Amino acid sequence: LLETELFGHVRGSFTGATENKRGIFEEASGGSVFLDEVSEMSPALQVKVLRTLEEQEIRRIGSNQVIQVDVRIIAASNRNLPELVTEGRFRQDLYYRLRVIEIELPPLGERLEDIPLLVEHFLKKFGGERGRSFSVSPRALSLLMSYSWPGNVRELENALESAVALNRSG
């Protein structure tokens, strides 16, 4: 499924492929593609992504036609990619192709100063969706900042969404 999403497919290439489908790489040509949790890609998919980066071309599933693409890849992982390379679970050549500019972002529990800004952002987002305004008390913010947030920003967002859904006072 991920392969067809990234590279597209031609009609009849597999059961259910009733029409041609452009993939994300083709659609994003001239722009950027964000690959989240890149460490979870299968070895076969890693090879295809590497080939796309090196050759700047793709082939839709079931096709022999080469399509030129020009994409910038932004990749993220919550796992240690150099460790996975050492263990043989992530291709070294793909790692170095992706690692043009590396930005290391510590876990949210190590960036407590970001929590108030994130809380404000998410409360505005959820308030806009509901046509309401939400705020957080200093005590609640203190509690949020004392938690380790092992699920990082996604966990914080989910906690705030739950609080907003259950909140009656704003």
Image: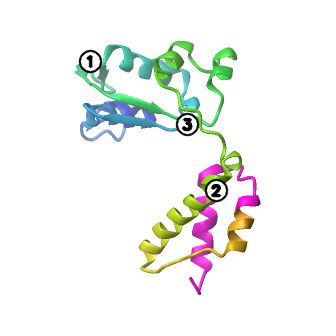
Tell me how far mark 2 sits from mark 1, CA to CA: 43 Å
* 52 displayed left or right of 106: left
Q: From the viewer's side, name the closer residue of 37 and 18.
A: 37
Magenta segment, which residues? 145-170
Marks 2 and 1 in Cβ contact (< 8 Å):
no
Q: What is the number of the mark on residue 151?
A: none
Q: Give SS at disc 3.
A: loop
Q: Position of residue 37 (x, y in %)?
A: 55, 36
Q: Residue at x 33, y 36 (%)?
A: 24
> Mark 2 or mark 3: which is in front?
2
Tell me how far mark 3 sits from mark 1, CA to CA: 29 Å
Residue beneath disc 3: 37
Q: Residue at x 66, y 28 (%)?
A: 80
| 127 versus 64 height, above or below | below
Residue beneath disc 1: 64
Residue beneath disc 2: 155
Marks 3 and 1 in Cβ contact (< 8 Å):
no
Q: Give SS at disc 2.
A: helix
